[in-house]
Image (cartoon, rainbow, N blue to C red):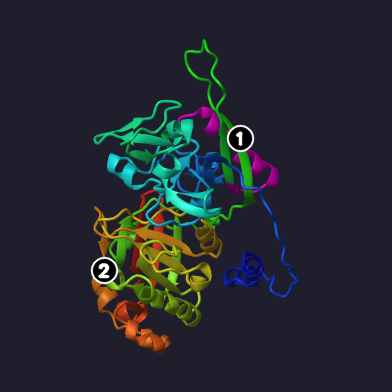
Amino acid sequence: MYKRQVYASSLNPDALLYRRKHNLIDYDERMAILLQRVTGRWCGRYFYPDIGGVGFSQNPFAWSPEIRPEDGFLRLVTGLSLHAVERVARDYPRLVALSHPHLRPENTLADKRRFSQRSMAVIDRQTQELVTVPTDDGLSECGPLLSLVAERDVGDSLVPVPPRAVPQPGDHLVVTFDGLTRDAAFVGLMRDTLQRLESVYGNPMNLEFAVNIEWPDAPVEAATPPPPVYHLHILECRPLYQRNLAESGPDPAPLRDKHRLFAMPSLLPSAAVEQITYLVFIDPAPYYHLPEGDERQRVADRVPALNDRLPASHFGLIGPGRWGSLDSRLSVPVTYSDICNSKLLVEISPPYTPPPELAYGTDFYEDVVEAGIVVVGIQPGQEGSEMDWELLRGSPNHLAEFVPEAADLAPVIRVIDLRAAAGSPLRIVIDNETNEVVACFEE
């Protein structure tokens, strides 16, 4: 079975689309199989590396003015790096700016709890399969790793785990990676590696990595144990796509008096999108009322048809949760090939949940950014935000004109002709100096 899956992957729609976009479709590109040893160690019944993740030699996400983009950026998990390159249900990797590793996008105790890793990818000795387990289970026999990746939640604060401590019954752990980011040896290793790769290749680089940690034995007379030693394994390395400076968004101030579809605080890099004439709006309320499974999959199955029939690069999609997640509990389960002709993806998160995850480093995000598609995460209801729900829910729905077989899904999927509904195409401006995103109409 696995052999068939490997060979069938050469016909994966995402792979074929990538080849077509890069004028490789007519070349005789043969299937190649690369075998890589999985790096890690056994921790009880589970095998995994201590740290996994992705890194950028240039930081596209400077959430604080003192952050130096040229020092790089990490997206960290414990366990196999799959949970750093995929968008996982209710899971958040730790985002690290290597110039200031102590600075987090999350400032409050509640946010540190919410934006944390709750599950990890491991190999199970009993089943001999790749599985996902809760971090509490995966770290239960990890020994000294605990002090670097987790803290104890004692109710009104998070308390560091002492070096080389072991989990205690009743411990409530939050994966923060604060012990790791406080270690100058680890931060320096990652910063130097990313800068060296950029220098050698002459281009900003994107790195997938794993780190195994060696814990030297402490001499009997030593007052404190010796520091850990980090062994870095490079799993994948490729050029990092960067938007040209000319594509950076203009000042949104002149747009404040125009009719706006939405305006929100944002920490995204500057960008601008022009001439969005159609919006595909998947309404979160009726979507989440659908039963999980086949009913929600029916909604996802209509997205590729709209992708093919709407004017390429002149339409956007706006919907619940995290685009690129295949979990229908979080979003509409689509892949890159399903939305590749769009120009804009807007991720809506309700005010009672964490906002959509900043997906830098995931395979889906890299594909859409390389294709010039702008991704915006918004959370209506937060302070300083506004949203024109009346236009989204009250405008004429053109779904049946483009996909007649999906007419029964009109309460969930809305196709809006913005020139008819608002008098002009939509324009989106993201400004990283004022930290806001504005979507407005020209007229």
Q: Is residue 309 above or below residue 426?
A: below
In this orientation, does residue 63 appear? Answer: no
Residue 314 is one of the magenta-drawn residues: no
Which residue sits at x=53%, y=71%? Answer: 337
Q: In what quadrant of the picture does the N terminus appear?
A: bottom right
Residue 206 is one of the magenta-drawn residues: yes
Q: CA distance from mark 2 to mark 1?
A: 51 Å
* Res 147 quadrant in image: top left
Task: Pinpoint residue 130: horizontal percent, then vertical percent.
Answer: 53, 54
- Which is nearer the eye, 86 or 78? 78
* Residue 388 disc label: 2
Which numbered mark, 2 or 1, is in the foreground of this view? 1
Q: Amino acid at mark 2?
A: Asp
Circles 2 and 1 in contact, beta carbons < 8 Å: no
Q: Would residue 404 appear left or right of 38 to someone viewing this image?
A: left
State the residue position of label 1: 231
Q: Amino acid at mark 1?
A: His
* Residue 406 disc label: none
* Res 189 quadrant in image: top right
- Which is nearer the eye, 369 or 4? 4
Task: Pinpoint residue 221: horizontal percent, then vertical percent.
Answer: 52, 10
In this orientation, does residue 407 appear? Answer: yes
Which residue sits at x=57%, y=43%? Answer: 210
Q: Residues within 10 Å of mark 1 (few under 14, many from 20)?
A: few
Q: Residues within 10 Å of mark 2 (few under 14, many from 20)?
A: some
Q: Would residue 200 appear left or right of 206 to someone viewing this image?
A: right
Task: Write the start and end of the magenta stretch as one range.
Answer: 180-208
Which residue sits at x=49%, y=54%? Answer: 131
- Which is nearer the eye, 167 or 228? 167
Task: Pinpoint residue 182: horizontal percent, then vertical percent.
Answer: 45, 30
Q: Is residue 292 above or below residue 219?
A: below
Q: Is residue 239 above or below residue 364?
A: above
